[in-house]
Image: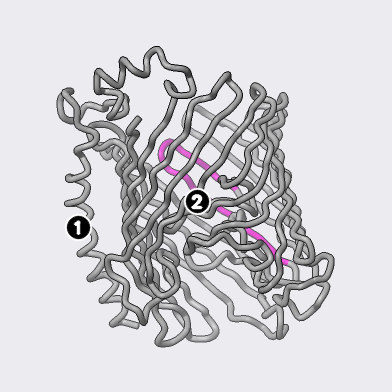
Amino acid sequence: MRKCLVRTWSVGRQLVAVLSFVAVALGGPGLTSAAAGEAKEEPLLRQIPQVQGTLKDADPFFRDTDLNVRLRTYYRGVQTTTPGKSQEAWAAGGWLEYKSGWWMDTLQLGGTLFGTAPIYAPENRDGTGLLKPGQEGFAVPGIAYAALRYHEYATVTGFRQYVDTPYVNRQDNRMVPRTNEGVTVGGTLGVVEYFGGYLWTQKPRDSDVFKSFAELAGVSGKDRGTMVANAKVRPLAGLTVTLHDSFTPDVFNTFYADADYGWELTPDLTLRVGGQYTDQRSVGQDLTTSSAFKEWATNVGGGRVLLNYKEATLKGAFSWTGPGNTIQSPFGGYPGYISQLFNDFNRANETAWLAGLAYDFKTVGLPGFTANFEFSSGTNAIDPVTRAPAPNEREYDLTLSYKVLEGALRGLSFDAKGAVLDYTNSGRTGLQLRLIMNYEFNLL
């Protein structure tokens, strides 16, 4: 374990040096005739007089076209809780995104090409999710859609697209995000923001292949899509209520609800409280094998408190999970309040709590720098298949972030994330380090 940690930090230091060099090199797209250090909002190609003249009188379909670039490099090193097993890779890539303007304020086309490639990827340390299994790179047109809209009331989108709901989402925490194939409709009606549709396949974060939702849920050889419905209601200032349901035939159904409300107690002091609940159960042919029961049902509920004083935020959260099964989230990131770098603290029968502190350093002369520390603890969990007691767990997570807020390198950000996972009554410990650089800029 000690050797793995030393190796992880050694490669991490090398990565920081390389990222610093790359950051300087990437300053090119942001540099204009303006003085260095001044933010320039105009996209690179629109600064060319000929392009400006061509687009000025063009149809909005062409005039309002967006062509955006996101570059990403990512190192992830993990010493798992299984003795002698580690994961490690350093990858580089990103995506090129195209969105047309709205033709007759009705039709839009869009597409995004994603890619990732290995820089350092030992074959015997696979599994980071930054690359395909086998530590291989890939490229995929993950977004390709046509959309029709009627004002803000309804937008119908077909084929490859993002979905951003509590249990079906892009989960953009590796090199490339999840995307989906399907037909959806969304819009705003008064205080209600709604979204729904049918998705037949999804592309995972570490693959260039779109797979059925049944396969993603661990049921091989079955072709099942997912129906999703989501609504956000804002009945009064500071209050947001979210309702969600996703249904995968013969696999499981997930219903989710949460409410979040914030008060400004003083100009410097804000209190925000939230509560959430998930009901999840197998349906139809009950094809999953994640529980000892063919027909299973489980749930998880929790609460959260955020107390913000000037630039500091104190956090507290708790959750409890039903004994029927561990909460399943194979179609995106888990939306629970206690979702950490290693674990989501939603194992069958688990009771968990979290305490944390975050700070924004802008008032001490370091704009763009933030730090976040969280401690989480989970007890009383059981294995959902064998029903045997599972180890109690404690996790310590620290995130340091820096984002360039202005100047020629605006759009550049760095994140360093570290975690320690301790299975307290088993003697097993996991270590994790993530180093990430993103650079976003608009070409058109």
Q: Residues within 10 Å of mark 2 (few under 14, many from 20)?
A: many
Looking at the picture, which amino acid does disc 2 mark? Gly
Q: Quadrant of the N terminus?
A: bottom left
Residue 388 location in percent, x, y?
69, 85
Q: Residues within 10 Å of mark 1 (few under 14, many from 20)?
A: few
Check disc 2 and report the residue beneath it: 142
Residue 315 location in percent, x, y?
52, 50
Q: Is residue 84 above or below residue 414?
A: below
- The secondary structure making up most of the magenta span is strand
Residue 404 in magenta stretch: no
* Residue 41, picture quadrant: top left
Q: Is residue 223 above or below residue 1?
A: above
Q: Is residue 24 rendered to the left or right of residue 108?
A: left
* Residue 373, picture quadrant: bottom left
For residue 376, say whether it is visible: yes
Q: Is residue 318 rendered to the left or right of residue 229?
A: left
Task: Determine the residue positioned at 42% across, 21% down.
Answer: 63
Residue 433 location in percent, x, y?
36, 66
* Residue 398, picture quadrant: bottom left
Q: Nearer the viewer, residue 88 or 432?
A: 88
Residue 319 in magenta stretch: yes
Which range of residues does the magenta coloring cover?
305-321
Q: Is residue 311 above or below residue 295?
A: above
Q: Nearer the viewer, residue 52 or 20?
A: 52
Mark with earlier residue (2, 1): 1
Looking at the picture, which amino acid does disc 1 mark? Val
Check disc 1 and report the residue beneath it: 18
Q: Is residue 378 rendered to the left or right of residue 79?
A: right
Task: Determine the residue positioned at 61% across, 50% down.
Answer: 181
Which of label 2 and label 1 is nearer to you? 2
